[in-house]
Image (cartoon, helix red, strand yellow):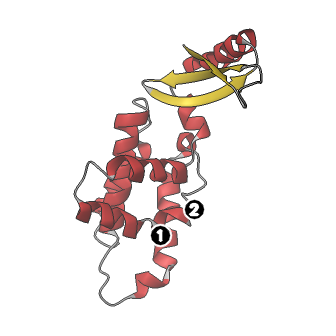
Amino acid sequence: MAIIKRRYRRKKQQKPVTFYRAEVYVEGVRVSAKTFSTRREAVLWHEKEKHKFTLSPSSLNDRMTFEECFKKFLEDTKLRILKISYQKYEVHSIYFYNSPLAKVKMSELKGEKVVEWIDWLKKKPTAQFQMRKSFIEELKSLRAVLNWYKNFLNKDFLETGEKTAEIIFKDSHL
């Protein structure tokens, strides 16, 4: 539980203003926060929010889209991986932001969504380049994002998208 009491003055002669900030953390990550004028309101809101997130571990999945997940992935990995690897993910970001996967909620991310994304990739103008042999690098990036999401944000994440990516990854006709 995190309810923080804050006080500040706008000017020296004015009475100090007091407010309460309620924050909900899941596994060390702040998932929601709100400011209230009374402590009672803050505690009540905090208990409701906390109950929402403790109902099931997949409640984070229900609210996060793949695009938000990819942005968090880039923010989190920027300092932890080599610059060249980070640049590779930035280059592949065009295949994730404006794609059919972008607006899919993480709870709805299944194998058929990955197949739709690959079909969308095949229709892109970049798929017609003579130098392009396959979409293996894009699939590796997708696999890295899904593994990161599973390891750092939601341990109960369904692995169907990841398994489908591995199955497709083995096919040589991509």
Left or right: residue 99 compared with residue 143: right
Rendered location of residue 64, percent (x, y): 57, 42
- Residue placed at 34% from the left, 36% from the top? 151
Left or right: residue 10 compared with residue 81: right
Rendered location of residue 71, percent (x, y): 47, 53
Q: Outermost residue, bottom direction?
A: 130
Separation (CA) of disc 2 from disc 1: 12 Å
**Quick one: SS at disc 2?**
loop
| Res. 86 image quadrant | bottom left
Q: Which residue is mark 1?
A: 94
**Closer to us: mark 2 or mark 1?**
1
**Quadrant the N terminus occupies:** top right
Q: Is residue 163 visible?
A: no
Q: Which residue is mark 2?
A: 100
Residue type marked 1: Ile
- Tell me: residue 37, above or below residue 87: above
- Residue placed at 69% from the left, 16% from the top? 42
Residue type marked 2: Pro
Q: Earlier in the sequence, mark 2 or mark 1?
A: 1
- The label shown at residue 104 is none
- Residue placed at 48% from the left, 62% from the top? 96
**Quadrant the C terminus occupies:** bottom left
Q: Outermost residue, top direction?
A: 40
Q: Is residue 26 visible?
A: yes
Task: Estimate how packed mark 2 is, as few (under 14), some (14 to 19) or many (20 or more) residues with alpha carbons within 10 Å.
Answer: some
Foreground residue, 162 or 153?
Answer: 153
Rendered location of residue 73, percent (x, y): 40, 49
